[in-house]
Image: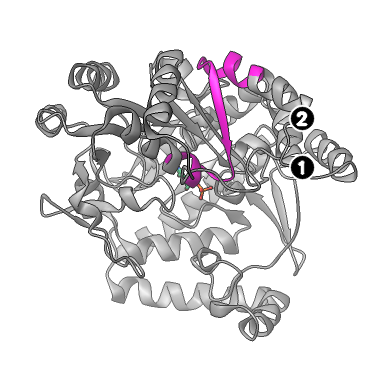
Amino acid sequence: MSALHSTSETLGGLIAGERRRFLADHPRSAALAEQAKAVWRGGVPMHWMADWASPTPIFAAHGVGAEVVDVDGHAYADFCLGDTPAMFGHGEITVANALSDQARRGAGFMLPTATAVIVGRLLAERFGLPLWQAATTATDANRAALRWARAVTGRDRVLVFDGCYHGAVDDTFVSLASGAPAMKAGLVGQVHDVAAFSKVIPFNDLPALEAALAPGDVAAVLAEPVMTNCGMILPDPGFHQALREITRRAGTLLIIDETHTLSTGPGGYTRAHGLEPDIFTLGKAVAGGLPAAVWGVTAELAARMDEAEARIGPGYSGIGTTLSGNALTMAAMRAMLETVMSQEAYDRMLAGATRLVAGLEAVVARRRLAWSVVHVGARVELVFASPPPRNASEMREALDHDLLAVFHLWLINRGVLIAPFHNMMLVSPMTTDARIDQLVEAVDGFAARLESLNA
Ligand SMILES: Cc1ncc(COP(=O)(O)O)c(C=O)c1O
């Protein structure tokens, strides 16, 4: 078995060649990148857009289905899908029509619309929690969930898993450094000691969970059902059942963030695996790429929220933003929930993911690589480690930033986009078998090239 890990000498020439190839093939993107530097700090409207492995950002012209066309005319097989919002395809016509119709009649009124009632029913039926609120991003949905959890329980701590990402939520910016909790590196302008009120433990570590909840000071555990933001880490068998039992016993609320694991099936991981969260949060794809998110609660929690509100009394809640729940996002969510996110769409994306997983596993086996393929429904991750890590500290050990960078650039130069963060690949209902095979062939070509470098 070959780990095919990089050394700067082995990869240096490959990286330089791939960078030259990109620049030769992307003159218009390179020219726009120069112009953008004069008006956008860092050359892009949001700094994550500069996180790609390409020497300049790729400027998008348009997207249709599972394809993105750039300003130089390259049509990419898109497995990034906007980092999830376009999970069901770009330019979805049902959503486009709903948006255009609602935009002509007004985007928002600070009043609910009749569509909101329909959307609430659709959410309750699909995800199983009876009462809902809207937010503008998954970040905001998670912030609201944590605030309410503290208000309801009267406890000040929250608990997250090492390596988590739940959006720009201050309470979650803690990680384990050599086993000890610490603020995440690189935080800008953070003056509060987040680690003072947030506990952080390794994923899949039930004794650590028992110990962290034992003092009775944790309002909520906020968790993705499968960790998708530090590579992909699957829960051990029985983990979720134990997580629920332990949180219930400790009087700690369980918030399940399905923003990425919506890839599992029509009702998310929660419905597919019978999870019983007190709060369920979801953003990104739920409004087809429009900024919108939702969070749902059990009837029991809703009653406790009413009691807490009465206790707190009138004033500004510190929760909510002006655009949340507006008419435009409700129209988009109705189109998504009623039409686009259908069982048939999931059947297609899950079949595509099965093909992708099989193709990647065949490459790993044929080339005897110490890599693994992990997936949750239509979301697939190629992990440069075998067996796949069970927690974030193992994942960090396996991370090879140089190898990742050249892998991503290799794929871009062969017409494939995957999310710029680790090796996340998302299959949409529009992704064709030919595009999946193109990705698998590109990975195989990369592995062959590494083999020849290491020979
Ligand atoms: C699991 C999870 N929750 C929440 C978020 C935050 O989403 P947004 O950036 O749309 O607020 C993300 C973003 O990647 C995420 O992966």
Check the picture and name the quadrant holding the N terminus.
Answer: top left
Label 1: which secondary element:
loop
Question: Does the magenta segment cover residue 338?
Answer: no
Image coordinates of residue 451 in percent, x first then y, are 35, 58
Q: Amino acid at mark 1?
A: Phe
Q: Residue at x 81, y 41 (%)?
A: 99
Tell me which segment is drawn in magenta: 121-142
Q: Quadrant of residue 152?
A: top left
Question: Badge 1: how crowded within 10 Å, few (<14), some, or many (20+)?
Answer: few
Image coordinates of residue 276 in percent, x first then y, are 38, 16
Q: Is residue 195 above or below residue 12?
A: above
Q: Amino acid at mark 2?
A: Thr
Question: Does the magenta segment cover residue 136?
Answer: yes
Image coordinates of residue 341 in percent, x first then y, are 66, 26
Q: Which residue is mark 2?
A: 113
Q: Quadrant of residue 257?
A: top left
Which one is in front, 65 or 189?
189
Q: Residue at x 77, y 39 (%)?
A: 92
Q: Which residue is mark 1?
A: 109
Question: Does residue 431 appear in the picture of this structure?
Answer: no
Image coordinates of residue 125 in percent, x first then y, are 60, 13
Q: Residue at x 40, y 41 (%)?
A: 228
Q: Residue at x 73, y 77 (%)?
A: 28
